Image: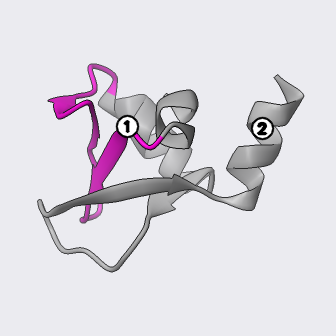
Amino acid sequence: MLRAVEAGRAEVTGGVEPELYVDGLPCCDQMATHDLVRAGLLRPTQPTSFGRRVCAELTDDGRAALAAS
């Protein structure tokens, strides 16, 4: 999931429980998405609102997690 975000293939929605879309399709593991956002590994590239999709980006911690894997 983080590699898709790194490659610019992911979008995320706003809201308490954000959803991740990869290549326009909903990610099958939304619980993992929630965990990645809460852990501060990915975030929206711009302010968003409930249900509105925007591009996702890695945070510094997300880039570090990928570098360590």
Tell me which residue sits at (25%, 30%) in the image: 23
Dividing the picture into quadrants, the one containing residue 40 is bottom right
Q: Is residue 4 above or below residue 61?
A: above
Q: How is the image coloured?
A: one colour
Q: Is residue 41 above or below residue 27?
A: below
- Label 1 residue SS: loop
- Outermost residue toward the right? 68
Q: Is residue 14 left or right of residue 31?
A: left
Q: Is residue 58 above or below residue 22?
A: below
Tell me where residue 41 appears, x and y as whole percent.
Answer: 62, 50
Q: What amino acid is at disc 2? A: Ala
The earlier-in-sequence mark between 2 and 1 is 1
**Magenta residues (range):** 8-29
What residue is pinned by disc 2?
65
- Residue 57 can be seen, yes or no: yes
Q: Is residue 17 left or right of residue 37?
A: left
Q: Is residue 42 left or right of residue 52?
A: right
Q: What amino acid is at disc 1? A: Arg
Tell me where residue 26 appears, x and y as whole percent.
Answer: 19, 30
Dividing the picture into quadrants, the one containing residue 21 is top left
Let me know if residue 20 is in the magenta part. yes
Tell me which residue sits at (43%, 68%) in the image: 45
Tell me where residue 61 appears, x and y as whole percent.
Answer: 75, 53
Tell me which residue sits at (14%, 67%) in the image: 50
8 vs 33, nearest the viewer: 8
Q: CA distance from mark 2 to mark 1?
A: 18 Å
Let me know if residue 28 is in the magenta part. yes
Tell me where residue 67 appears, x and y as whole percent.
Answer: 84, 34
- Bin the neighbour count of mark 1 within 10 Å (Cα to Cα): few under 14, some 14-19, many 20 and up: some
What residue is pinned by disc 1?
9
